């Protein structure tokens, strides 16, 4: 079984880096409200990954986008996310200050912005679609969906233990973890782009 998709997804989603956002968004929440937010965020993250794994390629076909072009574009997006992570910024954190303030005022912020775009944004979606194309049989597709379950569980654990994790690691520890994940993601993004470029320009393989 190839665990590269799982490693890539863990590096992009990186729930540890989103823990400070979770703490901020759930300030003033009761224990029950916080638990509900954790559950909805985890289930939503799985739903995004599973949907991209199952029908992502069909969506590309509908818009007449070649996978090679998507690999190059997706690889560039991954590299951009990796560079952000090397600067200790979450890969998918695209929420503006206005969105932060607005989200804090809502009864539920589990889906937006916690899940989309903070956890599973464009980089995550493009990665799942690229690996879905590489799946050769039903079991490999099922494994990709299963990795969505692992991501959901990792998200649930990190969010449930948000306060202890934040106290134990501190901002410095979270930054170190984010940078390490960013380094891994940078290497994987180059590999994805190289594969797409070889498909677009076969002469590069020679």
Image: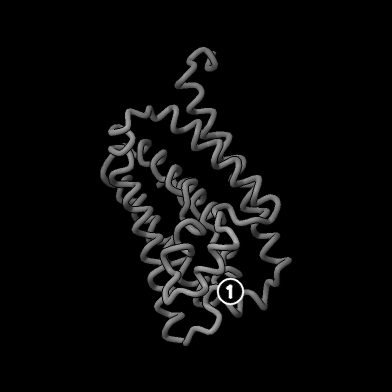
Residue in view at x 28 percent, y 44 percent: 55
Q: Quadrant of residue 190?
A: top right
**164 sits left or right of 203 in the view:** right
**Residue 117 image point, x, y percent:** 48, 56
Q: Nearer the viewer, residue 45 or 21?
A: 21
Q: How is the image coloured?
A: one colour
**48 sits left or right of 34 in the view:** left
Q: Quadrant of residue 64?
A: top left
**How would you rate the neighbour count of disc 1 (Cα within 10 Å): few for under 14, some for 14-19, many for 20 or more?**
few
The answer, for residue 131, to whether it is visible in the render is yes
Residue in view at x 48 percent, y 15 percent: 202
Q: Residue furthest right?
A: 172
Q: In this rendering, is residue 7 above or below 76? A: below
Q: Residue furthest left?
A: 138
User: How many numbered tags mark residues here?
Assistant: 1
Q: Nearer the viewer, residue 98 or 196?
A: 98
Q: In this rendering, is residue 65 above or below 139? A: above
* SS state under label 1: helix
Q: Quadrant of residue 42?
A: bottom left
**Viewport quadrant of the C terminus:** top right
Residue marked by disc 1? 24
**Residue 60 image point, x, y percent:** 33, 35
Residue in view at x 52 percent, y 71 percent: 158
**149 sits left or right of 118 in the view:** left
Q: In this rendering, is residue 12 above or below 195? A: below
**Residue 102 image point, x, y percent:** 51, 68
Residue in view at x 36 percent, y 41 percent: 132
The answer, for residue 3, to whether it is visible in the render is no
**Residue 25 image point, x, y percent:** 54, 73
């Amino acid at each position: 079984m190839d665990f590269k998709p799982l490693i890539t997804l863990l590096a992009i989603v990186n729930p540890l880096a989103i823990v400070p956002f979770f703490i901020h968004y759930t300030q003033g929440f009761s224990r029950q409200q916080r638990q509900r937010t954790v559950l909805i965020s985890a289930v939503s993250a799985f739903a995004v990954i599973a949907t991209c794994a199952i029908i992502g390629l069909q969506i590309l076909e509908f818009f007449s986008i070649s996978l090679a072009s998507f690999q190059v574009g997706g690889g560039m997006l991954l590299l951009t996310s990796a560079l952000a992570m090397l600067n200790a910024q979450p890969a998918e954190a695209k929420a503006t200050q206005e969105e932060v303030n607005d989200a804090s005022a809502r009864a539920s912020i589990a889906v937006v912005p916690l899940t989309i775009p903070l956890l599973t944004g464009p980089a995550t979606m493009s990665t799942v679609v690229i690996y879905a194309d590489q799946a050769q049989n039903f079991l490999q597709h099922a494994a990709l969906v299963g990795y969505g379950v692992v991501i959901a569980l990792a998200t649930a654990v990190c969010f449930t233990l948000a306060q202890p994790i934040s106290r134990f690691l501190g901002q410095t520890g979270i930054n170190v973890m984010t940078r390490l994940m960013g380094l891994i993601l940078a290497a994987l993004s180059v590999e994805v782009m190289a594969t797409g470029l070889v498909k677009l320009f076969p002469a590069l393989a020679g």
